[in-house]
Amino acid sequence: MWAYDFECDKTMAEIISTLNESGPWEWVWRDKDAFGPYISSVPFEGVRAKIYDLDGYYSNGPTYTADFKLGGGCKAERAAIDNVFSDLLGKLAARNVTEGEGYD
C-alpha cells in the first residue's frame, strides 16, 4: 500500500465529479465509520484506490489522502498507476502533494 496527502480547494462532491468527468477511472461514493464518506475506484483489476478527507468526518478539505492497494493477481505496476493519478491531481488543482501513510 502507498498513499499521497494533498491539499485541494474542492469539496469531496466536487472531487468525485471532476475525477469522473476527467476519466479514465470511475469513482464511487463509500462510507466508513473511521473517517466518514470517501470515494473509491478500481482502476485496474486487483487495484483499489480511495480518497478521503484527512481532517476527519465530513470536513471537506482542504487536506485529503489518496491511498492505493494492490491485491493478488494484480498486473498493473505502481508507476502506471502513479502516472495516471498525477494527471488527475493536476485536474483537481492539487497542491502540496507528499507521500502519506494511508489507512487500511
Image (spheres, rainbow, N blue to C red):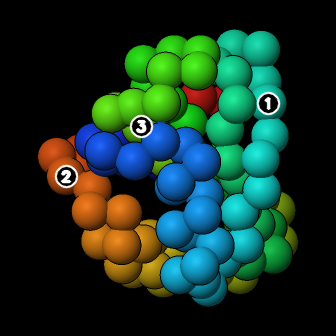
Residue 47: % across, % down: 71, 65
Give the residue type at disc 1.
Answer: Asp
Task: Identify residue for label 1.
Answer: 31
Image quarter (top left, top right, bottom left or bottom right) of the C terminus:
top right
Please give the label number shown on residue 64. 3
Vertical placement of residue 37 versus 16, above or below: above
User: Closest to the observer: 86 or 103?
Assistant: 86
User: Closest to the observer: 22 or 32?
Assistant: 22
**Distance from the alpha carbon under mark 2 to that under mark 1:** 25 Å
**Distance from the alpha carbon under mark 1 to that under mark 3:** 15 Å
Q: Is residue 10 left or right of residue 22?
A: left
Q: Quadrant of residue 31?
A: top right
Please give the label number shown on residue 95. 2
Can you see residue 21? yes
Give the SS element for disc 3: strand
Dot 1 or dot 3: first in sequence order is 1
Dot 2 or dot 1: first in sequence order is 1
Can you see residue 86? no
Q: Is residue 66 left or right of residue 91?
A: right
